[in-house]
Image (cartoon, rainbow, N blue to C red):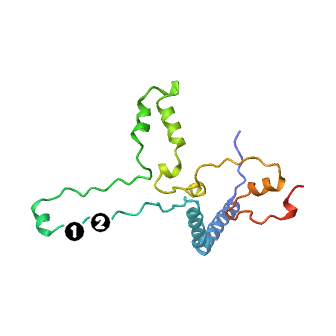
Amino acid sequence: MSRQLNMDTLRQNFWKEEYLREMKLRCEWHRKFGALVKAKQRAKAAARLPLKLPTLMPKAPESPPAVSRAALSKAPSPAPEVPLQSEMYPVPPDTKALLYEGISHDLQGRYQYLNARKLDLPEMRYLFPITTNFTYGWQLGPPTKQELVSCKMCRIESFFRKNGAFALLDPRDLAL
């Protein structure tokens, strides 16, 4: 059975004109608003890029003393060595030795090393706070043990920080 196409010359011309009109309309729109859309797309793409924070490095050491020109011409120096800058202090040898004693399955080796490193204060491990979360506990000192007192107001006063956060207590905030 043959398919009947209800396409005579009149209908073909209609669709041809319709297609051309649509293409013209699209080109016109693209000419008017294309640059604006591209700018918005670039702005959205830039917003999706990860934020690049500057790296915090310790202050650079003082420059070495000046060397005379005669000493420079005598011995050609190899490529200048770039000092390796680390964010952490070097591991003490006794702690590093824990890595090579036993295996983690027996709670030795790496397991024991990581537990020993965990017990060190962050300011003993790192040269400077690496993230902003480090600044909250940086140089906080050892935890102090406070005895529980029976007075409710004493507990409330000892609960809140002394650095200004929640310094002023509103009587409506207290559960009596």
Query: Looking at the picture, how far across and down is residue 140, in whole percent?
Result: 59, 55
Residue 65 in the image: x percent, y percent? 24, 66
Residue 56 versus residue 158: which sits nearer the camera?
158
Q: Which mark is residue 103?
A: none
| Amino acid carrying mark 1 in the image | Ala
Please provide percent x and percent y for residue 129. Answer: 52, 56
Q: Residue furthest top?
A: 106
Compared across the picture, whether 63 is left or right of 32 comes to: left
Nearest to the observer: residue 171 or residue 86 = 171
Residue 63's disc is: 2
Report the residue marked by disc 1.
Answer: 66
Which secondary structure, mark 1? loop
Q: Quadrant of the C terminus?
A: bottom right
Left/right of residue 144 with respect to residue 110 in the rendered view: right
Mark 1 neighbour density, 10 Å: few (under 14) some (14–19) many (20 or more): few
Please name the residue shown 52% across and 27% down the image. 107
Q: Is residue 35 above or below residue 14?
A: below
Provide the secondary structure element on which disc 2 rests: loop
* Front residue of 4 and 164: 164
- In the depicted structure, whether residue 41 falls above or below residue 108: below
Towards the viewer: 80 or 173? 173
Looking at the image, which residue is at 39% across and 39% down? 93
Vertically, is 47 above or below 33?
A: above
